[in-house]
Amino acid sequence: MLSKRGDGYHDIRMVMQSVTLCDDVQVSLRGDGGVTVSTDLRFLPGDDRNIAVKAARAFFSQLGETGLGADIAIHKRIPVCAGMGGGSSDGAAVLRALNTLTGKPFSRKELERTGAALGSDIPFCVAGGTALAEGRGEALTELPAFPDCRFVIAKPSFSVSTPELFSRIDLTAVKYHPDTAGLLAALSRGNLAGISHRMYNVFEDALTQKHSEIAAIKSALLDCGALGAAMTGTGSAVFGIFDSVKRAETAQSALSRHYGEVFLAAPRPAVLI
């Protein structure tokens, strides 16, 4: 994070990576202009508050088709309110699915622009892969593919309020900043250790004592052999990077004894549209 903008957003500069942990999103067209969404989680809204519905309406508006609609069904796998872009990835999946169902009228960049009006991280979720995100997150530069590795992701029982964290962070008092230039150089060389050692999430400086379990998860991942570990986004999930599938599986098993949501994932390449 670099600075606060006049529009209330923050300028950021960070490397983002998509992983194989994903929700199942099914989309079908309907001819009456209606948009419905159903999920397997009762507490998620099924109306226009759902980002998947907003994405469908934005797509049809961009297409200029008032008579088309969509039925959307979402089975959640990505933990909710974890700083992992689960809702944004669902919205992006709807944009990509509708693009396919209507004969691919839009390029990936056009879908990214449509998504940017809905949320800062939807453009990245449309593109996927490895990217440098700047601006408020919508300005993307595609990067070399992430080296082969495994991610272990664990979420504690609590979530972290994103607005609260943004309101508490003091950029002048941030202890450390990630070595983004060094990370980009390591990425260009495919140096997994170099990437892992340069990771840092400045939002961790804004956490309070009630979030101490996040630091405990980081320590547990490192004790299990992770090359590096950090909180995801504004949390509360934490990920560790492993250069060994066996060590990653052992870490997942160890953390599963204490946390209900622990996942094993691999890097995922950019989406072809």
Image (cartoon, rainbow, N blue to C red):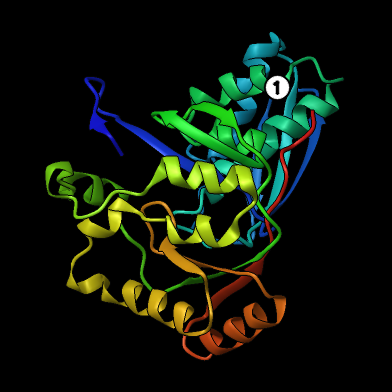
Picture residue at 19% right of the left edge, 55% below the top: 175
Picture residue at 23% right of the left edge, 31% below the top: 3
Where does residue 153 sit, x and y in percent of width and height? 54, 68
Picture residue at 68% right of the left edge, 30% below the top: 95
Is 170 placed left or right of 52 in the picture? left
The local secondary structure at tag 1 comes to: loop
Is 27 placed left or right of 267 in the picture? right
Q: Is residue 87 visible?
A: no
Q: Residue furthest top?
A: 64
Where does residue 12 sit, x and y in percent of width and height? 36, 34
Question: Where is mark 1, residue-wise?
Answer: 33
In the rendered image of this protein, does residue 102 appear above or below residue 179?
above
* Rendered image quadrant of residue 124: top right
* Amino acid type, residue under disc 1 in the picture: Gly
| Along the viewing direction, whichever of 6 and 267 lies nearer the viewer | 267
Count of picture labels: 1
| Along the viewing direction, whichever of 90 and 71 lies nearer the viewer | 90
In the rendered image of this protein, does residue 165 appear above or below residue 254?
above
* Rendered image quadrant of residue 272: top right
